[in-house]
Image (tube, rainbow, N blue to C red):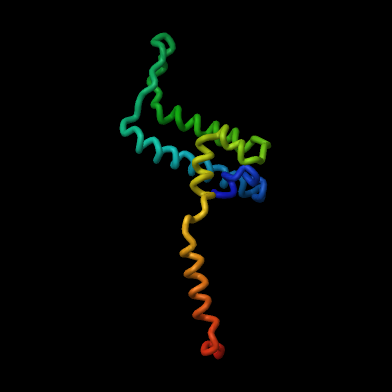
Amino acid sequence: MAAISHPFFKLGWLPEEKKDSCRELFLTSVRNFEAGCESAENTSPEKVDVDDFFDYGVTPAADVTMNAIDKECINYLSDTETGLTMLSRYPKVRKVFQKFNTTLPSSAPVERLFSTAGQIEVPHRNQL
């Protein structure tokens, strides 16, 4: 997800047979991320009504949102620009990019790794 949401990589590094499944995985991830954000903001789904003359039923706002998310993701994946500034045109993709491409704010995991390596590479363990 981190590589697909990065404008420099997108789907270009994947073999052809895996691009479709990764594209669907990316779309699902963006949908789920947006659904989580929207459920925190809005608890009841709203209906979008149209003029009575052209009324073919009531369209749930969630369906309209899904179509907008899919369209934004497809436009993002087909865009040829590779700079990070392009993410400003795709706000939903930018949120996923920030989630998966943000570094850890602490060095504790690396310090634990070095501590463990220091316990292994000692003279009394040379016969293992």
Indicate left or right for 28 with 84 as reference: left
Q: Which residue is pictured at 52% across the width and 87% down the height?
A: 125
Q: Observer-nearest residue: 38 or 15?
A: 38
Residue 72 % position (x, y): 55, 33
Quarter of the view holding residue 62: top left
| Image quarter hosting the C terminus | bottom right
Q: Which residue is pictured at 66% across the width and 40% down the height?
A: 82
Q: Which residue is pictured at 50% across the width and 33% down the height?
A: 69
Q: Observer-nearest residue: 40 or 114?
A: 114
Residue 3 % position (x, y): 59, 49
Count the marks. 0
Q: Is residue 37 visible?
A: yes
Of all residues, the one furthest to the top in this rendering is 53
Q: Which residue is pictured at 49% across the width and 41% down the height?
A: 95
Q: Is residue 122 above or below residue 92?
A: below
Of all residues, the one furthest to the left in this rendering is 44
Q: Observer-nearest residue: 107 or 53?
A: 107
Q: Is residue 22 above or below residue 42?
A: below
Q: Is residue 128 visible?
A: no
Residue 104 % position (x, y): 49, 56
Residue 88 % position (x, y): 56, 34
Q: Observer-nearest residue: 92 or 17?
A: 92
